[in-house]
Image: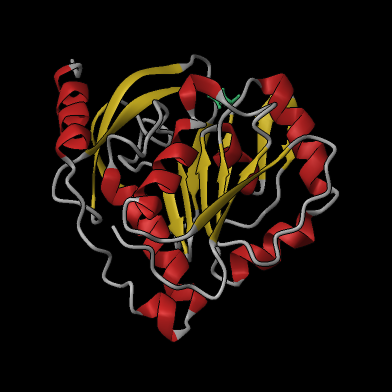
Amino acid sequence: MAPVELSRPLRIVYLYPDALNLYGDGGNVIALERRCAWRGIPVRVDEVRMGESLDLTDTDIVMMGGGSDRDQLAVAHELLAQKDKVASYVEDGGSLLAICGSYQLLGRSYYMGEDRIEGLGVIAAETVRGSDRLIGNVAVKTDLAPEPFVGFENHGGRTLLDAEATPLGTSVITGTGNNGDDGFEGLIYKGVIGTYLHGPALPKNPELADWLIAHALERRGDAQATALLPLTPLDDTYEHAAHDAAMKLLP
Ligand code: GLN
């Protein structure tokens, strides 16, 4: 597709690929980048690694994957020290995809063993401990797409949304989602999507990728960005085939 004009390229920040990249979560960044490029939208990806300074000005989409408890704790320390940057980005409506451990980290707190770890507190949720791990393929109904979103979950924590929070998955069809009790999966707040869907989630749930891109362009607010909305549909034959293959894995 012919390149389109934007005041500056859409900037995707991939946070901590060196710590948070379970089950191919980094594939979400590739999906976002490709779906912009296929539409001729200028796009740039910046990886921010542990110890590097975080600058979220001129950032349109942030992606954070899941990680082991040890890596998640290191990231918690890294981000708690610069919590205000993340909080301002979220409150300003920045698009942010947070998978599993990162989703937990955005809430008020989560547990590592017996220890309660303070989270960033930028979403209305907290994560408590459970006795066993919640592992398996998952499908959830959402308001974002006609077909359920699919993925793979593996988490010990149970995430509880505050009453006013909006879940991403309004009903879990297969698997456990946030906690296995209330039928919810993930959360949507402003431009933030928190979810337990690993796999990675975006290549086989392209509507979720496009939601993040569209939200980012809307936030830009200028005429060039707004002219790209609604997003040009893409040929999602392969994405739908991947989605259908994941659906066939469901018990
Ligand atoms: N350590 C967290 C848990 O098990 C998150 C794991 C993950 O990101 N998959 O609850």
Please identify the quarter of the rendering in which residue 201 is found.
Answer: top left
The residue drawn where x is 32% and y is 57% is 39
Image mark count:
0
* Towards the viewer: 141 or 49: 49
* Towards the viewer: 10 or 200: 10
Colour pattern of the rendering: secondary structure
* Towards the viewer: 144 or 105: 144
Quadrant location, the N terminus = bottom left
Percent across and percent down for residue 87 are 69, 62
Please identify the quarter of the rendering in which residue 182 is found.
Answer: top left
The residue drawn where x is 39% and y is 69% is 4
Percent across and percent down for residue 13 are 61, 49
Percent across and percent down for residue 247 are 17, 25
The residue drawn where x is 30% and y is 73% is 229
Q: What is the residue that sits farthest to the front in this orientation?
A: 2
The image quadrant in which ligand 1 is located: top right
Q: Is residue 146 left or right of residue 111?
A: left
Q: Is residue 240 left or right of residue 112?
A: left
Q: Is residue 226 visible?
A: yes
Q: Is residue 192 left or right of residue 144?
A: right
Quadrant location, the C terminus = top left
Please identify the quarter of the rendering in which residue 150 is found.
Answer: top left
The residue drawn where x is 19% and y is 40% is 148
Percent across and percent down for residue 15 are 65, 41
